[in-house]
Each structure stands twice: as structure tokens, then as C-alpha cells.
Image (spheres, rainbow, N blue to C red):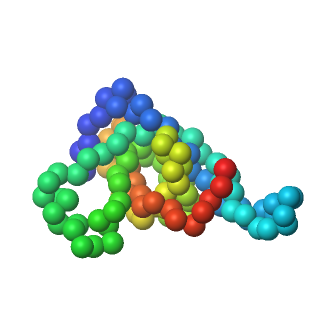
Amino acid sequence: MMLRYKPSDFNKTVQFGTVKTTINRTNANSMKTFVPQINLKYAPKTRTLTQQYTILGTKLEDTILIVIRHNKAIHGKLIAKLADGQYYDIVSVSPDDSNNIITYDIVTLTLNKTGIQQ
């Protein structure tokens, strides 16, 4: 895959991390909190009209794509927190395993609905 991006395209920040269950000191209820581990810059990726029509009615219909510099530490067990403050599950990571000097990964994300708190 030959992706070309300018450094200025990577103008948004994403945090990748895990979810930790903690006890609320006020009422002793358990709550899920996000624990950031990796901070990266990303570029939003848009789909073509043909791609949008192709994924209609599939589990990928409500997903978004982001592009990051190639990073082997990013995998499907992490949670992503985008600049909009929303939490996303990683559906898939499409790594660029070419021999190019600069490589990119396309990360497919879907909105996390488990009630993670900051």
C-alpha cells in the first residue's frame, strides 16, 4: 500500500490504552477508567463513495478510519481515545509492511459503548 501524507496531516492526537476497573470511594461501586499508555498523532482517513456503499449493512458500517505512523505496539486489545474525547475499540489494524522508509498503519475504530469514565 502506498500512502502519502504530509507531516501537517497528522494534526490530531490519539491516546491508546487499557481499561482498569477501580472502586469508587464515594459509593463503593466499581467503575471502568481509561489508563493511557501511548500518545500518537493521527490523520483522519476518509472512505471513497464506493467504499461507503460496499460496507453498508456490515459490521464496519459505523466505523471510522485513522492513519498513524507504523507502530507495532498498536493491537486490538487497546482502547483509543480520540481528540473528540470519545472512546473507541480497535476493530482492525492494517499495517504497512513495505520496505519504505516511512510507513503508515490504518486503524479501524468503532465507538466504545461500555461506559468508560475519565
Q: Is residue 47 left or right of residue 117?
A: left
**Foreground residue, 116 or 17?**
116
Q: Residue at x 35, y 54 (%)?
A: 64
Residue 2's image quarter? top left
Compared with 46, 111 (above or below) is below
Q: Residue furthest front?
A: 27
Q: Position of residue 81 (x, y in %)?
A: 53, 49
Seen at 42% across and 31% down, the residue is 11
Q: Is residue 107 visible?
A: yes
Relative vertical location of residue 73 with respect to residue 31 in this rendering, above or below: above
Which residue is outermost to the top? Answer: 8
Q: How many marks?
A: 0
At a point 42% along the width and 65% down the height, the residue shown is: 91
Q: Position of residue 35 (x, y in %)?
A: 68, 52
Q: State which quadrant residue 67 falls in.
A: top left
Which residue: 21% across, 68% down? 56
The answer to whether 31 appears left or right of 107 in the picture is: right
Please state the horizontal and vertical placement of residue 82, each as a whole percent of the image.
49, 45
Residue 93 appears in view: no
Q: Position of residue 39 (x, y in %)?
A: 57, 41
